[in-house]
Image (cartoon, rainbow, N blue to C red):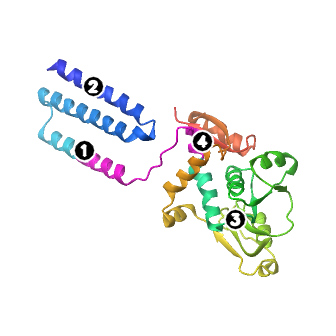
Amino acid sequence: MDTVLRLVYLGAAACFVIGLHLMNRPPTARRGSTISAAGMAAAVAATVVVLVRSGTVTGTGWAVLAAGVSVGGTAGWYLARTVAMTAVPQAVTDAQAAALPTAGMTALRMLEVAGLVLGKRVLVTGPTGGLGRLAVQLAHLAGARVTALVRDRAAADEPLRRLGADDVVDRLDGDFDVVLEGVGGATFARAIEHVAARGVVVNVATQDPEETVTFRASRFDRAAGARIYTLNMPDEVAWNASGVSDLDRLCALVADGRLDCQVALEDSWRNATGAMDALLGRRIAGKAVLHVD
């Protein structure tokens, strides 16, 4: 019997290894999950046999074990059936995929609010950050004429033009059909003053919950039909049920080489402090991704 149990444990371990390998690829991930589950079931069954043979578990103990298996199994089955997941293409690295759910989805949702931007004038504020860099690229891919508003034009001009910006400016002239506003404060106010008639300012940033934004009402009043849209990502994704489809679209663009995730730093999660210092000190431009190792 001992030999049989050892073989069962060995087979269970093999199932885990094979299952993890298969879960690396979307086409075989479901089969890998099934094989891993079978290995776990075999290991649990073997452990039960060991406990029965030893006679050391009381009736209460068996009841607790049964309850734990039932609750854990039911919870796992429910989550596996209900939690939405996205198949990440092989051409997309883990670091690239990690950069998409926040900045990438936010930039995409901002453009979805704006609607068709083909040939329209789109202003992106904060374009040197992780969100702004993706917003510039997506607006360019959508056929817009993209203007990037920056603080240091000399430093930002070439990198942003490579991403698709048609104009890189440090002051605003003229009006824009769409403003993708990710800075807040005085920049938000300036953006409101430069929205065109029937245009939209999509805002995702406030620097302080009590922040007051002051702008010249006459500048906004002249833009007939213009609106300001405050985008809250949890609500936006829930309303549109778009989480999976948004990530699918973004991953496809990355896999095709049409979207650069702008991952500027990859490091171990153990060096989270160093990564935060690099971001806050503006020593890197783009996204920082930490690997759990």
Q: Amino acid at mark 4?
A: Gln
Mark nearer the N terminus (2 vs 1):
2
Mark nearer the N terminus (4 vs 1):
1
Q: Position of residue 131 (x, y in %)?
A: 67, 53
Instruction: Tell me the magenta residue range.
Output: 70-99
Q: Amino acid at mark 3?
A: Val
According to the picture, the residue beneath numbered tag 1 turns out to be 68
Circles 4 and 2: CB distance less than 8 Å? no
In the structure shown, which secondary structural element does the residue marked by tag 3 occupy? loop
Residue in the foreground of this view, choosing between 257 and 225: 257
**Mark 4–mark 3 distance (CA, rounded to whole Å):** 26 Å
**Mark 4–mark 1 distance (CA, rounded to whole Å):** 37 Å
Circles 4 and 1: CB distance less than 8 Å? no
**Mark 3–mark 2 distance (CA, rounded to whole Å):** 56 Å
**Mark 2–mark 1 distance (CA, rounded to whole Å):** 24 Å
- Select label 4 or label 1 by which is in front: 4
Residue 254 shown in magenta: no
Circle 3 packing at 10 Å, graded few (<14), some (14-19), many (20+), is: some
**Mark 3–mark 1 distance (CA, rounded to whole Å):** 54 Å
In the structure shown, which secondary structural element does the residue marked by tag 4 occupy? helix
- Select label 4 or label 3 by which is in front: 3
When asked about the image quadrant of residue 1, the answer is top left
Q: Amino acid at mark 2?
A: Gly
Residue in the foreground of this view, choosing between 227 and 265: 227
Q: Residue at x 36, y 51 (%)?
A: 79
Q: Position of residue 154 (x, y in %)?
A: 88, 48
Numbered tag placed on residue 117 in the rendering: 3
According to the picture, the residue beneath numbered tag 4 turns out to be 96
| Above or below, 192 relative to 51 | below
